[in-house]
Image: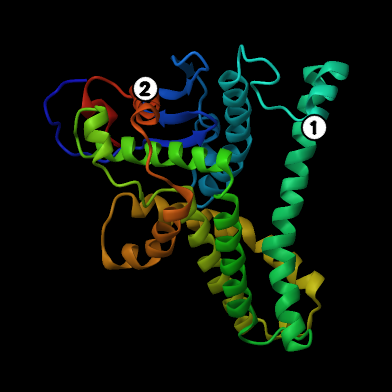
């Protein structure tokens, strides 16, 4: 990178924190940088086209948000598992801090069984998410209101969902492994900010940047919750008959609305990345505040990983990276 300060420009650069690593998506594709046990940084370029580039329908506004969310879940999980493998490559079982059960399964059935366990864990994770963020809030409000879907039911349900979400993230952030992932999350944001501000990608420049970014997935989750409250409330007002349905039907209605919430939420996050008006600030504020939990200040060695990942997906000419 040139040491000259570049003209500020908006980009389509985005990323994801991994285990001892960072994945970045940019004009040249995707790349994953991981800190290996020997201290070296291994950068792997991923020549994978976004799903929306494979089908024009996937690029339609609203639809692209739904597709992007599903794609991020699928590919993100793959990157996460690959980074976990690379970050422990060459270590003994004791150094990997594997549980006795993990060691027994690995010795008896090999890596395939571990992959199966990974899939089962993902399914259980989705089940837990459904219970915490869909069923539990609805059940708690039903308990208070006597099981009737009142006019303000969606609002109270949304408030409970926000409380559960914040509490859950605060609790898991106390885990040593998750805390370190959040440090890489901070490095991802700082590196992207440094690039967007047109500064050379150096550890010193990146360190000065904010770790709170409006296009973060955390902000996306909060926007989805807020949109869910608004759309659910609108449905109750437009269709008063919904006030008489039971909890199972109400949850089904919310699941059917969820794709629309994803699509609108994506469009807002995309808009927020290019604008800085009062409307954006108000809706982005909860997500930015939440990033005080989901991002942590990175050390210089973690920042180096973020820089390596981003440099692999951008061009030498800033004008080539601009969104047309």
Earlier in the chain: of badge 2 and badge 1, it is 1
**Quadrant into which the C terminus falls:** top left
The secondary element bearing badge 1 is classed as: helix
Q: Which quadrant of the figure has residue 323? A: top left
- Horizontally, is 106 left or right of 266 in the view? right
Q: Which quadrant of the figure has residue 194? A: top left
Circle 2 residues within 10 Å: few <14, some 14–19, many ≥20:
many
Disc 2 from disc 1: Cα separation: 31 Å
The reply to whether residue 61 is visible in this rendering is no
User: 161 or 71, which lies in front?
Assistant: 161
Q: Residue furthest front?
A: 94
Q: Which residue is mark 1?
A: 117
**Quadrant into which the N terminus falls:** top left
Q: Which residue is mark 2?
A: 308
Q: Residue furthest right?
A: 108
Q: Residue at x 34, y 26 (%)?
A: 307
User: Which percent across, then down, holds residue 107?
Assistant: 83, 16
User: Which percent across, then down, holds residue 14?
Assistant: 41, 37
């Amino acid at each position: 990178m040139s040491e000259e300060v570049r003209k500020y420009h908006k980009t389509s650069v985005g990323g994801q924190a991994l285990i001892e690593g960072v994945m970045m998506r940019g004009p040249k594709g995707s790349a994953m940088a991981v800190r290996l046990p020997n201290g070296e940084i291994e950068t792997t370029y991923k020549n994978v086209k976004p799903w929306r580039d494979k089908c024009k329908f996937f690029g339609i506004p609203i639809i692209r948000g739904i597709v992007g969310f599903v794609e991020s879940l699928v590919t993100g999980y793959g990157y996460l598992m690959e980074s976990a493998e690379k970050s422990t490559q060459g270590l003994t079982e004791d150094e990997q801090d594997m549980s006795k059960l993990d060691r027994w399964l690995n010795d008896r059935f090999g890596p395939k069984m571990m992959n199966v366990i990974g899939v089962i864990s993902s399914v259980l994770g989705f089940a837990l998410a459904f219970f915490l963020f869909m069923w539990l809030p609805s059940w708690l409000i039903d308990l208070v209101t006597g099981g009737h879907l009142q006019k303000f039911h969606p609002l109270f349900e949304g408030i409970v969902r926000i409380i559960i979400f914040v509490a859950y993230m605060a609790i898991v952030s106390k885990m040593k492994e998750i805390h370190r992932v959040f440090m890489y999350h901070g490095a991802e944001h700082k590196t992207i900010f440094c690039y967007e501000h047109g500064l050379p990608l150096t550890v010193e420049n990146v360190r000065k940047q904010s770790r709170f970014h409006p296009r973060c997935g955390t902000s996306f989750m909060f926007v989805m919750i807020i949109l869910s409250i608004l759309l659910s409330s609108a449905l109750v007002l437009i269709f008063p008959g919904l006030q008489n349905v039971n909890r199972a039907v109400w949850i089904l209605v919310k699941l059917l609305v969820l794709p629309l919430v994803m699509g609108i939420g994506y469009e807002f996050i995309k808009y927020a990345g290019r604008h800085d008006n009062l409307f954006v600030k108000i809706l982005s504020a909860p997500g930015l505040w939440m990033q005080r939990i989901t991002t942590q200040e990175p050390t210089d060695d973690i920042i180096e990983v973020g820089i390596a990942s981003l440099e692999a997906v951008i061009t030498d000419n800033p004008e080539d990276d601009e969104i047309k």
